Image: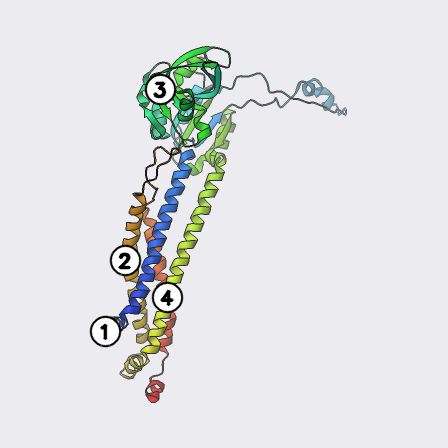
Amino acid sequence: MRLLATIALTLLRAKLRQSIVAAVGVMFSIAMFVTLLGFMNGLNILLDGLILNRTPHIRLYNELRPSQEQPVQLAYKDSAADKVPLHDFIRSIKPKDDLPRLRNATAIMEALEKDDRVLAVSPRLVAQVLFNVGTTDLNGQVSGVDVMKEVRYYMFQDYLVAGDPNDLATGNNTIVLGKGLADIMQAKLGDLVQVTTATGDRTMLRVVGYFQSGIADYDKVQCYANIKTVQKLLARPASYYTDINVKLHDLEDAPIMAKELAQRFHVQAMDIQTANAQFETGSDVRSIISYAVGVVLLIVAGFGIYNILNMMIYEKLDAIAILKATGFSGSDVRRIFLLLSIIIGLVGAAAGLVMGIILQHIIDNIPFVTAALPTVTTFPVDYSKRYYVIAVTFAMATTWVAGWFPARKASQVDPVEIIRGK
């Protein structure tokens, strides 16, 4: 094998320019594959994170719905039992008069915290309000949250463009305004804003921060306060919650567990996959396109190696004939040309990885400033090692296949015909 490797390197040096061209083709293919996959997956993480980071894995809530059994059905229930034909005509069904609260919310949270699948449980209280700005009323929604859990599990601080979450957690009658709403109201940090609830009660809240999610319509409505402030705003007891957000250890458990919790606690449950199916679809499509382009680049590089080795065989027929005439077998000749292909692939793969990492860092340092994404300052790049492994593995497989057919052809050369022709 040492002798065969020496012969392969000698042939490589004899056609150094063509060999370099083939290695450069592999290098660019791997570099573009790694760069493209890293950038596209980084973009997927960024776009999906705008929603998924702020979305619980399972949301428990109590949605107001029409009663399943209407009074007319209950009144003639006995008649139906006696098989008397009965036709009910009910129109304009209204939901039953009930508060949008979760019954026994405290007991539900205690049960969830004991579940090994659950990472975190946090209550939420949502209030629809009006912000009074002079003679104008602006629609808004104030979400009462456990601020410290929001910071730890839902990236709340990453979307806080001004202010300190501790001021919201510990302060009384404090609020974080959506950036769009704050701009309309011209509300500065420390200002007092007047809030009117659905029941007509008015309260003054002090602005301690701005929240910006990157979705303009959302930021013109959504605001945050600690949950005690919202309970006080609505004049509700400390056990009054409209939502329970559940964070799981494994995201894939969410659909099954949501159905289980809905039946167990008699509430509505929404899992993250159902709530954000369109985002997963977009990410999958972008990933498929990226992998397809990268694979095509590697295949094109393989054709380049195939063509160069084919040309080398035709130009080195004399050397192949001499090798066979001096005792080298067809399998030895095949190994020589396969070694040529593998050497080109290894050199191109190493150079491609270095170039790909450099290009990723260049993209990662390009400024990307937009008002919609205040926490993002450069283009996103994912530095996952699996892209490097996939690129090198596929490149080596491609170069081996590209070298196999020319090597097989070289092993079948008849030295007698070559020498007789000369």
Residue 351 is marked as 2
Is label 2 in a helix, a strand or a loop? helix
Whether residue 178 appears in this view of the structure is yes
Q: Residue at x 38, y 39 (%)?
A: 46
Answer few, some or many: residues within 10 Å of disc 2's Cα (few below 14, many 20 plus, some between 14 and 19).
Answer: some
Residue matched to label 4: 304
- Mark 1 or mark 3, which is nearer to you? 3
Q: Residue at x 36, y 24 (%)?
A: 210
Provide residue 347's location: percent of width, then percent of height.
27, 61
Whether residue 123 appears in this view of the structure is no
Provide residue 160's location: percent of width, then percent of height.
35, 27
Furthest residue in direction bottom, as rendered = 420
Mark 1 → mark 2, Cα distance in angstroms = 26 Å
Mark 4 → mark 1, Cα distance in angstroms = 27 Å
**Closer to the N terminus: mark 1 or mark 3?**
1
Asked if disc 1 and disc 2 are in contact, CB closer than 8 Å, the reply is: no
Left of 23 or right of it: where is 278?
right
Q: Amino acid at mark 2?
A: Ala
Is label 3 in a helix, a strand or a loop? loop
- Mark 2 or mark 3, which is nearer to you? 3
**Quadrant in the picture for the C terminus:** bottom left
Provide residue 86's location: percent of width, then percent of height.
75, 24
Residue matched to label 1: 3
Q: Amino acid at mark 3?
A: Lys
Is label 1 in a helix, a strand or a loop? helix
Q: Quadrant of residue 341?
A: bottom left
Answer few, some or many: residues within 10 Å of disc 1's Cα (few below 14, many 20 plus, some between 14 and 19).
Answer: few
Provide residue 71's location: percent of width, then percent of height.
67, 18
